[in-house]
Image (cartoon, rainbow, N blue to C red):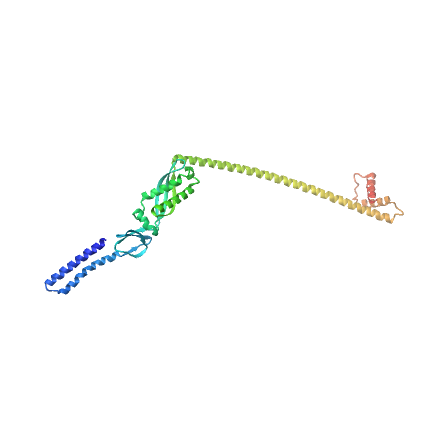
Amino acid sequence: MSILILSIILSITLMIGIFIVVLYFQHKGRVNKRAFMFVPLGLLAMLLLLSECFVTIKANEVGIVYDEFGGLQEEVKYEGFQTKSIFQHITRISTSNRTSQIKIDAQTIDSSYATFSITIIYKVEAANAGKFYKSTNSVEISQQQLSSLVKEALQSSSIKYEIYSILGDKLEEVRVDFTENLKEIIFERYNITLISTSFDEIDAGTRIEEIIKNKAEALQQIEIAEAEKQKATIDAETKKIQAEAEAAVEKIKAEAEAEIVKIAADAEAYKVEKEKSAIIEMIDSIYQQYNSSLTYEQCSEIVLQTIFFDKWNGELPEVLTSDSLSSLIGSLISGSN
């Protein structure tokens, strides 16, 4: 509106000035009445209004439109060269990611307090820029507004957990819950899109930290004792298995040796039996040849004496009696019968 008023005033001033100049020169007789045709040239000053009909929106920006007759518009101007009314004013808002670091105190379910150092990354989407500007009346959300939202979201999450859980195994669970809460609140209140959050540090005080440290050391000692117990159990089991394996090996060895002895005895018995059968066959053969002149006992004696002298090495046995020889002959004869 100011440009329009300025253009009108400038145009009127120029037209009056041109009229006075023409009138002066006509009075001097230097120009005729046609010179008054130049008076409307003063309206060229209205060309200044053309500069208000165009606007350029830079990359990663969006233009918020305020119309002097229609107020703040939800419709926005996007990147590039854009046209607009001379009654519209453009406010540029960045759509790039923004980062904010906030320290907030929050209470836990066990009535403890901790100070959270949080980093938040967020952005204003181009489609929501008009609503964002209406909510904040600024191109940026204030630190007080953002801190209030963070505190509200964090408190609704931290109150569900004990301080020891937050500082321990539930930390990521708390962060995810807080992120979901903040994402919903910040969009509902200011049309801001939350990108990510992180817990940079959590200060629960020296007393809580000392308790957690002692607890961690105690748990570590328990884990060490448990590991040593498991190792001792494993060693004992290993020794037991080794002893059982050695006993099994000895048993198998003894069984194998017994089997070898048995096989050797069986082989010797088989050999004796075969030799015995062969001698009987020889006696039978001789007896059949000389049965008219020799008795079976005489044939047996001849065969045994022949075998004895064929195998004799010239040394006399330590023990040899007629009774033992007769016993052997008797057994052979009995076997043949």
Which residue is more in the foreground, 169 or 301?
169
Q: Position of residue 116 (x, y in %)?
A: 37, 40
Q: Position of residue 253 (x, y in %)?
A: 66, 41
Which residue is more in the foreground, 113 or 138?
138
**Does residue 106 lie above or below 293 as drawn?**
above
Question: Where, by quadrant of the figure, is residue 34 drawn?
Answer: bottom left
Residue, far left? 28
Which residue is more in the foreground, 325 or 242?
242
Question: Where, by quadrant of the figure, is residue 295 drawn?
Answer: top right
Q: Is residue 296 visible?
A: yes
**Does residue 298 lie above or below 217 as drawn?**
below
Does 36 sit left or right of 78 as displayed? left
Does 106 sit left or right of 33 as displayed? right
Q: Position of residue 16 (x, y in %)?
A: 15, 58
Q: Position of residue 89 (x, y in %)?
A: 27, 53
Image quadrant containing the C terminus: top right
Which residue is more in the foreground, 266 or 83?
83
The residue at the point 38 percent across, 41 percent down is 154
Does 54 sit left or right of 213 as displayed? left
**Does residue 36 lie above or below 231 as drawn?**
below
